[in-house]
Image: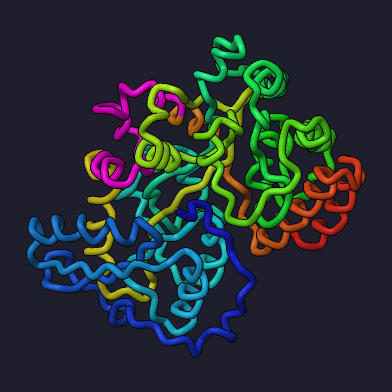
Amino acid sequence: MHRTARTASVAVAAVTALTLTACGGSGSEDAAAGKKQTLTVWAMGAEGEKLADVAKGYEKANPNITVKVTPVGWDVAHQKLVAAAAGGKLPDIAQMGGSYMGEFAEMGVLEPVDTKTFSEKTFFPAGWKQSTIDGNTYGVPWYVDTRVLYYRTDLAKKAGITKAPATMADLQTMAQTYQDKAGTKWGLSIQPGGLDTVQSFYQFLYSAGGEIVTDGGKAVINSPEAVKALENYGSYFNKGLSEKSVRPGYDVTKDFNKGSVPMFFSGPWIMSLLKDNYPDLAGRWAVANVPTDKTSVSMAGGSSLVISKNSGHKAAAAKFISYLTDAKGQADWFKRTSDLPANIRAWDSGRLATDPGLKVWRTQMETAKVSPVQPKWTEITSKVDTAIESVTQGESSAKAALDKAQSEIESLVE
């Protein structure tokens, strides 16, 4: 499941001719929430498949509302959304990844969130912030996403390790110990290069106190903190603790199950994959917060729900979104999907409150960092991807690679 949607550089004019089967409301006249009407909703990936079941339950409780859910693959989501926006045919409600938000807000096609109905205090700060542009909020957080450390506890015990790594120095020591004393092929799986390598690097960068671009729009990828983080990241490859070449579509859970990879960073959906695909691993793995450098900070992702500015059903759309994002709705959605609730109160009862592993996710979300809103963010991060790969492959020092990235990024920020 593609959890962190990336914005492609697709020109609106180039996609207006695309035909879409679902469309939005009928102009600016807004129907009252109690009036008989149909809401159109686009949701991405597995969320689109699961949401249809939730919608059926909502329709039973609200017989005046028909909810038409259209699942959209993440691979075509951006293109379809841009085409719909260009043609004034966005659905009433759409799921939108955080990296899309700035682009669509700039187009002027999203209805600002009514902050009297939806309160910022209800949600994790990172979830709310990724939908806020120039002081206006355009999406209600639906689920949040971050990264934590997965590690094999049985192999740790074999290596004489009794606890998860607390610091970045501990992480490298543990990776080496896994190899030396537990006989694992690798110590830690992190991405060596290619598209979105930056997502593997964020945990090192943010925890060291670095960032790519400040919230104020200043490029700072060659700061001392960022250089230190990339030196640390590259050292795993220099020391043979991480694999220098990873094939496209690589599934780390297979090697985690075999024991050749004892540690990796990933998102919450991996928990379900491990439980479903490798039941024999139960009790032999755990999750831990990102080890501390200056602090423990992971990337923040997830999705929000937006309302089309052109919708004729804004009141009904807001009511349905409220149903999906209140504490009860969020707890139910977690049971269906394992998506982490964006609503903080959803974590106060049931498994979300009692499962030690889930407490790790909640702690990590409290410090998770959102990428700044930049129209050319994909192009910006591609420069960082290139810098990381040049270091992991031994072609450049961290300082030289990030100086080059800095010079290229400075002309891209706004």
**Residue 339 part of the magenta-drawn span:** yes
- Vertical order, 107 against 336 (above or below): below
**Residue 325 appearing in the image:** yes
Quadrant housing the C terminus: bottom right
**Residue 341 appearing in the image:** no
Spot occupied by residue 78 in the image (x, y as percentages of width and height) = 51, 69
Residue at 62 percent across and 24 percent down: it is 291
Left or right: 150 as drawn, with respect to 376: left
Spot occupied by residue 372 in the image (x, y as percentages of width and height) = 63, 50
Which corner quadrant of the image does residue 33 belong to? bottom left
Q: Name the one closer to the observer, 308 or 304.
A: 304
Residue at 50 percent across and 18 percent down: it is 154
Q: Magenta: predominant secondary structure element?
A: helix
Q: Which residue reaches farthest bottom?
A: 17
Left or right: 332 as drawn, with respect to 410: left
Which corner quadrant of the image does residue 54 belong to? bottom left
Spot occupied by residue 56 in the image (x, y as percentages of width and height) = 15, 60
- Vertical order, 42 against 53 (above or below): below
What kind of colouring is applied to the model shown?
Answer: rainbow
Q: What is the number of callouts on the image?
A: 0
**Residue 401 part of the magenta-drawn span:** no
Residue at 51 percent across and 30 percent down: it is 364
The magenta-colored residue range is 331-360
Residue at 31 percent across and 21 percent down: it is 354
- Vertical order, 212 against 173 (above or below): below
Spot occupied by residue 366 in the image (x, y as percentages of width and height) = 49, 30
- Vertical order, 102 against 262 (above or below): below
Quadrant housing the N terminus: bottom left
Left or right: 148 as drawn, with respect to 401: left
